[in-house]
Image (cartoon, helix red, strand yellow):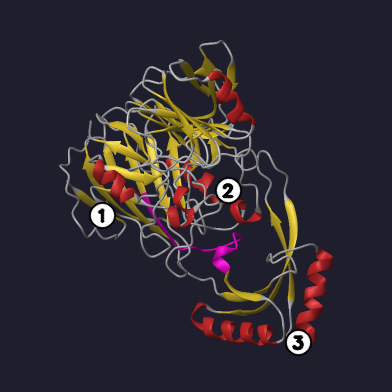
Amino acid sequence: MSRRTFAGGLAIAAALTLTALPATAEQQSVRFPSAKFPLGTRAIPTKTMTAVTQGIDLYDVKAGSSTDGYTVTVLMPSGRDYGTLPTAETQVAAVEAAGEMASLQKVIRPSVADAPSQTVYMVRVGLWSFKDKKKAEETAKTLKDAGLKVKVDYLGDDGLKTTGPWDVKVVMIDAKTFRGSYAASLGASVAKRETVSSMAKAQKAVVGVNGGFFNIHTAKNLRGEPVGASVVAGKLLSEAVPGRSAVVLKGHTAKITEVKTSVVATSQDGEAVEVNGVNRAAAPDEVVLYTEEYGAKTPTGGTDIVLDATGKVVTVHASGAAVAAGTRVLHGNGAASDWLSEHAWPEYTVKVETKVIDLRTKKALKLTPDLHVISGGVGLVRNGKVKITAKRDGHDSINMILRRHPRTLLGTTKNGSLILATIDGRQPGVTIGANFPEAAQFMRWLGATQAINLDGGGSTAMVVGDKLVNRPSDGAERGVGDALLVLPK
C-alpha cells in the first residue's frame, strides 16, 4: 500500500492491512478533481490519498474553516423549529414578554426536481461565537423558566451560508483496473441491525459503506428491515417502495436506477394472490413472504404455510414460529389467512414468482447469484445534472433537504467507475455535513454522472481494510440495516 499527501495534509495514521497495486495515471479512468472544493468559500482542499488495492484509492479530504456560532431557537406550538409567519410573530411577542429580544428569520427551503420551494419562519434569540456556547445555554434556560420551549442551535447545521469545515472520505473504484466485485449484505439476518464493520469482516470486504434506510417505526427486534428493495445474491429479501432510487450491483458493475418489485403466489389449483411484503411486519389482511434470512418469528394471530425448496406445502400451522433453514413461509392474517387456508393445503404446490423491475429500462432484472440491489435514499444526480427527487423518495422535508447532516453518497461515472463518499457532520467546529443540494454538487464535482444519497446521520460509516475510517456522529459505529461491500474477487 502506498500513501501520498497533498496540500500539506497528513498521511492516514493507521496502515491498512491490504496489498497496494496502484494503477498508473495513464490507466486510471476515475481521478480525484484538481479543482477547488465545491462548497463554502471554494478553497483548495487538503487531501491524502491511500492506494488500497488494485483499482481502489481512498482519499481523506478536509476543507473549510469554522466561523459559525450559536443561537437560541424558539419552538412553535407544533414542536417544530419553524412555522408560518403569523405563528412566528406570536412567538416573537412571547419572547419579548419574557424580557428578551427576538429576531424573525425568513428561511427558504430550495426547490428540488419534484417539490417546489417552501418559505417558513424561525424565531431566534441572540448570536454567540463558537466559544461562547455557554452563554447561549444560559439564555435558553432563562426562556425555559419563562415557559417557552427552546433549543440551542449551531448555525452550521441550518443549511444556509457557511464556511464549513468538512471532513470527507472518498473511495474511487476504477472500472478499468478493479478486478473484484460488489455485493449487498444484511448481516446475520434481515431483522437484526449490524455494523458495517461486522458485515465487512464477515465477507472479507476491502471496502464497506452503510446502505439504505431501515425501518425505525417497527418493533425493536425487527428494525434491521430495509425500507425499500433488497436483493442479496439474487434473492429478494425486502420488497421495493415502487419508483424509489436504488443501486443495482452485478459483478463489478454498479447502476443507479429506480425499481419496483412484484411477488405473486399461485396455488396448483390455479388461484393466485399478491404477496404484499417480504420479511417485514404484516398489516391486517396481508400475505407476507418470510425467508430463512429473516431471523425472527413470524407474526402471531394468523396462518403460516411452510414451503420447501420446490414450493411444496410441508406444514400448515398457526403463525408465530421461526423460519426453518431451507424453507419459506407464506403468512396471512384476516382475509389473507382465509385465502391460504383455502388454496395452500398440505402436499399442494404453491409457486412463488418474484420480479424486480428496472423502471428506466422497463425490464425485469435476472435474479442470478451475482445480482444485488440496495435501496437508495434520495436521487441526487441524473445524467450529469442535479436532479434531487426528494418527494418521490420520501424525504421532501426541510430537515432532509435543507438542514446539514452526515451523508453517505454513491455515484457512478460515465465509464462505470464507482465513487463512495462519506461526509461527516453534527460535530461543530470539526465537520458540519451537507444538505441535499450540497451533496449533489459535491458528487458532480467528484465526477459522478449519476448519484444517490444512502442512509446518513448516525448511520454514516465507511470501513476500509477492517478499519472504520470516518467519525460517526453518534461517537461510535451504529448498527444498520444493510451495507454495500466491495469484495476482492
Q: Is residue 383 above or below residue 477?
A: above
Mark 3–mark 2 Cα distance, whole angstroms, equals: 38 Å
Q: Amino acid at mark 2?
A: Pro
- The residue singled out by tag 3 in the image is 98
Residue lying at 33% horizontally and 24% vertically, measured from the top left = 370
Mark 1–mark 3 Cα distance, whole angstroms, equals: 54 Å
Density class for disc 2 (Cα within 10 Å; few <14, some 14-19, many ≥20) is some
Which of the two labelled residues, at mark 1 and mark 2, occupies the earlier sequence position? Answer: 1
Q: Is residue 94 above or below residue 488?
A: below
Mark 1–mark 2 Cα distance, whole angstroms, equals: 29 Å
Residue lying at 45% horizontally and 58% vertically, measured from the top left = 458
Which of the two labelled residues, at mark 1 and mark 3, occupies the earlier sequence position? Answer: 1
Say what secondary structure mark 3 lies in: loop
Counting from the top left corner in percent of width and height, residue 413 is at 42, 32
Which of the two labelled residues, at mark 3 and mark 2, occupies the earlier sequence position? Answer: 3
Q: Amino acid at mark 3?
A: Ala
Q: Which mark is residue 5?
A: 1
Q: Amino acid at mark 1?
A: Thr
Q: Which mark is residue 437?
A: 2
The residue stretch that appears in magenta: 155-169
Q: Quadrant of the C terminus?
A: top left
Q: Is residue 323 above or below residue 126?
A: above
Mark nearest the camera among 3 and 2 is: 3
Say what secondary structure mark 1 lies in: strand
Say what secondary structure mark 2 lies in: helix
Q: Is residue 45 above or below residue 440?
A: below
Residue situated in front as seen by the camera: 247 or 383 = 247
